[in-house]
Amino acid sequence: MLDKIDQFQKEFLQELEGVKNRGEINELRVKYLGRKGVIKSLLKQLPSLTVEEKRRLGGKINQLKKLVEKKLAEQEEKLNQEQPLTSQGEFLPHWPSQFGRLHPIEWMRQRVLNIFHHLGFVEFKGPHIENDWFNFAGLNIPPGHPARDLWDTLYLNQNDKKGNPLLLRTHTSNIQLRALEKYGVPLRVMAFDRCFRREILDPRHSHTFSQFEVLVVDKGINMNHLKWLSDYFLKEILGQVTESRFRPKYYPFVEPGVGVDAKCVFCNGKGCPICSYSGWFEIAGAGMVHPQVLKNAGIDPNEYSGFAWGFGPDRMLMLMTGVNDIRQFYQGDFQFLKGGR
Ligand code: DAH
């Protein structure tokens, strides 16, 4: 075995002489020091030897290992001097480096949150898997009520600990009671997050989508505040040329409820193909918080009032960017995210 060790040493030194680049150094490293390399195979033979031989040969093998490590390091250093990495095409990356950018939804999220931060709103996070109470019943939509048909809901076949059915939240309105319970009144909260519905998928419908929600509860809050905020937000996000318009609309958790429209920024309200010749875009749902919802949060509706406001940022983003399929925001298609599709 002693001869074998000497033989390997000789071979190694010869091979080292012929080495021309870092790739070949690595090959030698693997051949001698690797998991299935020469040194490991020599060490494996040790257990069958006597204690005396073990000591002698073990020492020898160790010397060989040290020598290989030292010589390889020296050779590597020599190569570094002769051929600095920058002049070695083979080790430079072959692809142009790429800068990341914000996902369009994240870009929108930051813009919207920023606008409302300036007005004193704090972000509130609600769970994606929600129970029936916070998503529906607590918001004045009891089980079996026809208003539930407004939301095509994905239920889990599981209840929470209190026996409440679990579902994927259909809107960010599920934060309303949660935020009121956690912080009490007066309150100004907002949420920008994902929601889920059982949709027949098409360019305007995705099972996963985003919503933005605002809730204000305080003494003396009225429709004027809601109208002012709608105008302010739409002008901030779409430009000063737009303005808001209210239409009566039914949502069980507000009374009165309104649909909020924005004046078309492409035709200044005259009517064009983008706004389907109506001059307006339907943007948001809103209204004064229903007294029953305040009661459900333990708040006296004779003392406090509030408004809630919710809209779909995906649709607005489509309008702003010309993207014509909502599903593209959720597919992670690299070409699309780079702006190439
Ligand atoms: N949650 C409603 C939806 O998903 C949108 C909405 C309507 C939110 C009225 C509100 C509101 O806060 O007051 O369609």
Image (spheres, grey):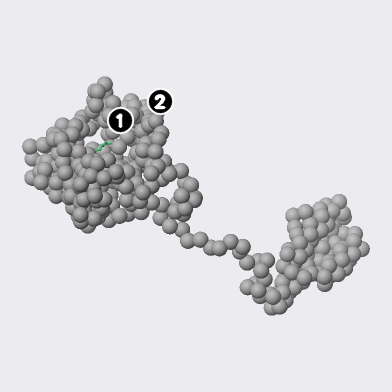
Instruction: Identify which residue, 270 or 111, lies in the foreground.
Output: 270
In-image side of 163 versus 26 (left or right): left
Q: Amino acid at mark 1?
A: Trp
Residue shown at 92% from the left, 63% from the top: 3
Q: Is residue 327 visible?
A: yes
Q: Which mark is residue 157?
A: 2
Q: Amino acid at mark 2?
A: Asn
- Tell which quarter ligand 1 is in: top left
Q: Of helix, strand and loop, which one carries label 2?
A: strand
Residue 268 vertical placement versus 259 (above, below): below
Q: Which image quarter: residue 329?
A: top left
Q: What residue is disc 1 on?
A: 151
- Cα distance between the residues tagged 2 and 1: 18 Å
Residue 98 vertical placement versus 341 (above, below): below
Residue 101 vertical placement versus 84 (above, below): above
Q: Is mark 1 within 8 Å of ligand 1?
A: yes
The residue at the far bottom in this view is 81
Residue 260 spot, x, y in % from top left:
20, 42
